[in-house]
Amino acid sequence: MTGEFPAVLVLVVITNFYILNTGRYVNSVRSIALQGCLLAVLPLPEALAGSPQALFLSAGTLIVKGILMPLILIRVIRSTDEFRVAQPFLGPVASVLVGFAILAAAFRAGALIPAPLRPHDGLMGAVGLATILTGMLIMVNRRKAVGQVIGFLILENGILILSLRISRGLPFVIEMAVLFDVLLAAMIFGGFIQSVHETFAHTDVSRMRKLKG
Amino acid sequence: MMTDLMDTAREIVRQWAFVLAVSPILPGIVAKTKAWFAGRRGPPLLQPYRDIFKLFRKGAVYSRTTTWLFRAGPVVSFSAALAATLIIPLGGMESPLTFQGDLILFAYLWGLSRFFTMTAALDTGSAFEGMGASREAAFSCLAEPALLLGLLALAREAGSFSMSDVLSVGLIRIWSIHAPALCLVTAAFLVVFLTENSRIPVDDPNTHLELTMIHEVMVLDHGGPDLALIEYGSAVKFFALGALLVRIVCPIRSGGFWEGGAALVIGLAALSVLVGVIESTMARLRLSRIPQLLALSFVLSGFGVILTLAAGS
């Protein structure tokens, strides 16, 4: 198991489950920030092995996923009172159990992912797959747009883990990460616009003024 | 053969004497820690001994609607807890009672004790106690898989279904290979420990508010020696489950019975302080939140099993 941190990958899975379980979007965003910081650790062995691009990938991940994206999301949530509490279709216990089934399935399937450059890395493929699938589960399980953005962020984190397993943090991966982050920003702004739209539909301040009579 | 039996009997008596002498001090340490956090002086450390002694000298009052089930409850739960302590190795050597599969016996002795506590509660005919019994049943059936899966992960790595083999020196080797998996199992066991002992994130041992009680409501109608047995039994349960946790976290087993026992008691005292800190700094979870916590502990244990399986294949 050289070149990966099992403890970091285990913590990534635990943050997945925490987000599945929690009902508050603020808590979800905090764990997303934590997950971003954890992901920034993963390319470090490559950097030590003598490829400085990996260091850029690590720093970029930390700044974008650990700091910027969570800050934007927190602002979106703070600005709209309506989005504080998730109203998932599946309850927390059921979604955690489904997440557990996903995890078990990902560990069965993780060994099947071809990885010519890293033949013997244990957990990365499975954890990446589980994170992707958990992100999808969260996306289909949340009613509000913010929840979908959170699910998408987790899915994207899973893609990063998986790409680190398949290739080795090559510039291509950095480009892909940037590409996805742009897409993500679009998603977040979409979520923002949608949230403003929904807020005005439900808690219209000008209509409240009419109550005074 | 005869001498073997005598030796085993002597070991059992020694272990029981040790457990019975030491266990009531642990709730005392928890109470003292909580008092320290609240800025009070708190009851003396030996208060649980005095309470138990006082209760044993009292008489008991039994309702006419109750049957033998009501009287069996405290006796069975106390004996089940004592029997479970025989499975845990206290000192440096093996535990007095050891065979393949005693892990499962350990898990289900708590089930037996719980079953009789619940039937005793239902036997009183009080709707209030029935409510407590129903909550206890619901939460314990969520905590049990976490305990069993955690034990499964440990047993798989140790290559044995016996508690003495699992909690042996081999655990140090397992820690060096599977530290993440063992951390997950330890965290899950801490949740199970708090649930089984009706401690704060799940149940508040001090509350007497109808809406929130779980364990306390089931023993409301017991008095005198019965209540003493329940209190003593819960202290022994704290000791047994805590010993499992302490043994996993620091698997060093020193040579003799007494040194090993002393080391274990120090570990348990630290655990009691930790419980006191958790009780002082956390609030009790809402009842609807408890299944979420237990489902998460189940996932932690299950993930531990998956990790050990993934590394093995």
Image (cartoon, rainbow, N blue to C red):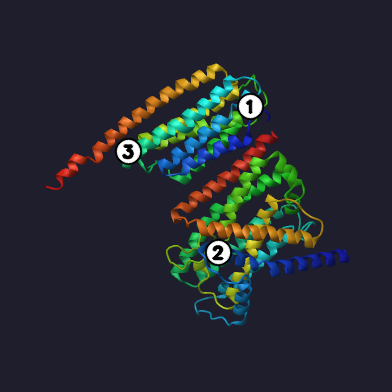
Few, some or many residues within 10 Å of mark 3 (<14, 14–19, 20+): some
Which residue corresponds to the image point at 64% horizontal and 40% vertical from the top-left?
B180
Give the distance between the C-alpha atoms of the residues marked 2 and 1, in whole angstroms. 46 Å
Q: Amino acid at mark 2?
A: Trp
Which residue corresponds to the image point at 61% horizontal and 25% vertical from the top-left?
A112
* B302, A42: nearer the viewer: A42
Residue at label 2?
Answer: B36
Give the distance between the C-alpha atoms of the residues marked 3 and 1, in whole angstroms. 40 Å
Chain ID of residue with mark 3: A
Does label 3 or label 1 sit earlier along the sequence?
1
| Left/right of residue B299 with respect to residue B171 in the rendered view | left
* Labelled disc at residue B17: none
Chain ID of residue with mark 1: A
| Left/right of residue B311 with respect to residue A137 in the rendered view | right
Few, some or many residues within 10 Å of mark 2 (<14, 14–19, 20+): some
Chain ID of residue with mark 2: B
Residue B302 quadrant = top right
Which residue corresponds to the image point at 48% horizontal and 60% vertical from the top-left?
B135
Give the distance between the C-alpha atoms of the residues marked 3 and 2, in whole angstroms. 42 Å
Residue at label 3?
Answer: A79
Residue A124 in the image: x percent, y percent?
60, 29
Q: Please, which residue is most extreme toward the left here?
A: A213
